[in-house]
Image: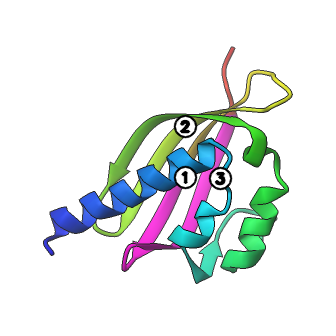
Amino acid sequence: MTDIDVAAENKRRFLEAFGRFAQGDTDVLFEIIREDFVTHSPGAPSGRDAWIEYIKNSPIATSTLELQHVIADPEFVVAHYHLTPAEGGPGEDVVDIWRFENFLIVEHWDVSRPTAP
C-alpha cells in the first residue's frame, strides 16, 4: 500500500468508528484500539480496556458529537468536533490526535475548550 492508501484507510476506519460511537456504540472502541493503547490525556488511564471503561463512564459517552474536520496522514488521524453534553449547555470544541499502527489506534492526545457563546 502507498502512504496515500494507508492514510485513506486509517481515515475510513476512524470515520466508521466515530460514527458508530456517536450513535452510542461504545463497543466499537474494542475494534479499533490496540490492547497496549497509550493516552496522554491527564487523568485518563492507558491500556485499551481501562481507557474504554473510563470513556464508557464519562460524559462523552452520552454527549452529542458533531464532527467538523478530519485530517489524515499515514500515521495520524486528527479530528475536530463539537461535543454537547446530554444535560445541555454550550459544550466543548475538541481536537483529538490518534496515532495508528497497522490500522489500529495505538496512541492518543487531545485538547478541548468550552465553546464560545
Question: Taking 24 as reference, is 115 above or below it?
Answer: above
| Foreground tag (2 vs 3) | 3
List the residue tagged with mark 3: 25
Asked whether disc 1 touches disc 2, contact meaning CB atoms under 8 Å apart, the reply is yes
Marks 1/2: CA distance? 9 Å
Quadrant location, the N terminus: bottom left
List the residue tagged with mark 2: 81
Q: Which residues are magenta?
A: 96-113
Tell which circle, 1 or 3, labels the residue nearer the N-terminal end: 3
Question: Would residue 106 appear left or right of 4 to someone viewing this image?
Answer: right
Coloring applied to the structure: rainbow
Q: Position of residue 107 (x, y in %)?
A: 54, 72
Q: Amino acid at mark 1?
A: Asp
Q: Which residue corresponds to the image point at 40% horizontal and 60% vertical from the top-left?
A: 13
- How dense is the environment of label 2, judged by Cα within 10 Å: few (below 14), some, or many (20 and up)? some
Quadrant location, the C terminus: top right
Secondary-structure class at tag 2: strand
Whether 54 is among the magenta residues is no
Q: Which mark is residue 96?
A: 1
Q: Amino acid at mark 2?
A: Tyr
Q: Amino acid at mark 3?
A: Asp
| Foreground tag (1 vs 3) | 3
Q: Main secondary structure of the magenta part?
A: strand
Question: Would residue 37 appear left or right of 80 to someone viewing this image?
Answer: right
Marks 2/3: CA distance? 18 Å
Asked whether disc 2 touches disc 3, contact meaning CB atoms under 8 Å apart, the reply is no
Q: Position of residue 42 (x, y in %)?
A: 76, 63
